[in-house]
Image: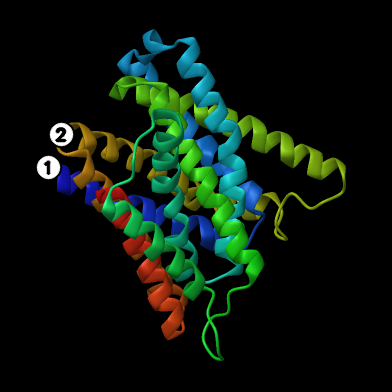
Amino acid sequence: MTAAFALATSLLWGLADFGGGLLSKRMRELTVVVVSQGAAAVVLGAIVVATGAWSELDARLLWCAGAAGAIGPVAMLAFYRALALGPMGVVSPIATLGGVVVPIGTGVLLHAERPGVWQAAGVLVALGGVVLAGGVGSGGASVERRTIGLTLGAALGFGATIQLIAEATPTVTGLFLALFVQRLVNVVVGGGALAVSARRGAPVLPAGGVAEVRAALPSLAFVGLADVAANGTYAVAAQSGPVTVAAVLASLYPVVTALAARGVLQERLRALQTAGAGLALLGSLLLASG
């Protein structure tokens, strides 16, 4: 059961990343974030009401989930921008690093934990992967320094978000409440940023206007709901078996994103970029398994 739910998590996260990146090529990344997370908030709200999770609301959960919600839009904005600018087969594996590096770093700094040998090896492998993923030579998809910078920033933001949600509550129902609060803050922060952009004269809607956003609603909702479902399947996987197994298998989602980009967008990577993306993913697996 643990393996099945963890692999389902990888599939859902991978498809959500691909969908978000694809939509960001057609409309503003911030619009994608606000609408998709709005759909997620609606579904999570229904789950919270159905499970009675409101009873677990306390100051710690509210603070941690609220902080995660404030960081989340910035991280997602950077990530979707990177996916829109660069090859998904490079961006997605690098972005996984934050989800394991930040929790490990938190353990070292706050709890005096010492990384294991495999985790130390994972850091070196992942760093080598990031360098190679930039690509050298001619041909294939190019990756600008800006794209790598956005991806690394998004990775740190994702890692901080994951750590904050993990600190918010130890229970599954509490997790859904924390995710609901996080999504609400996502929408408020993202919506506020959109309003500020509109006042400054920046385009908020795509070229097709409201009609184009309305037409894309099913896809936007899928991105948000797939992310919510992935959080749920991961919670089940972690509760039903070894957390290490769940974390490692759930970290495979960049493979799904890369395969989707290859099949739908015909995305081609240079040999060194492919090796770099693979090393970044291997580094993440080593870090998670340590």
Compared across the picture, whether 81 is left or right of 240 comes to right
**Residue located at (40% from left, 62% from top):** 124
Residue sitting at the far bottom: 138
Asked whether 123 or 199 is in front, the reply is 123
**Quarter of the figure with residue 50:** top left
Q: Quick one: SS at disc 1?
A: loop
What is the crowding at mark 1: few (fewer than 14 residues within 10 Å), some, or many (at least 20)?
A: few
What is the crowding at mark 2: few (fewer than 14 residues within 10 Å), some, or many (at least 20)?
A: some
Q: Is residue 47 visible?
A: no
Residue labelled with disc 1: 1
Q: Is residue 93 above or below residue 274?
A: above
Asked whether 190 or 142 is in front, the reply is 142
Coordinates of residue 248 in the picture (x, y in percent): 26, 51
Say what amino acid the circle numbered 2 marks.
Ser
- State which quarter of the image contains the N terminus: top left
Asked whether 90 or 194 is in front, the reply is 90
Compared across the picture, whether 30 is left or right of 18 comes to right
Q: Are marks 2 and 1 in contact (CB under 8 Å)?
A: yes
Q: Is residue 147 above or below residue 217?
A: below
**Residue located at (38% from left, 16% from top):** 49
Marks 2 and 1 sit apart, C-alpha to C-alpha, by 7 Å
**Residue located at (44% from left, 69% from top):** 128
Q: How is the image coloured?
A: rainbow
Compared across the picture, whether 124 is left or right of 85 comes to left
Say what amino acid the circle numbered 1 marks.
Met
Q: Which mark is residue 240?
A: 2
**Quarter of the figure with residue 172:** top left
Q: Which mark is residue 237?
A: none
Residue sitting at the far left: 1
Q: Is residue 219 visible?
A: yes
Asked whether 80 or 40 is in front, the reply is 80
Q: Looking at the image, tell me whether mark 2 or mark 1 is earlier in sequence order.
A: 1
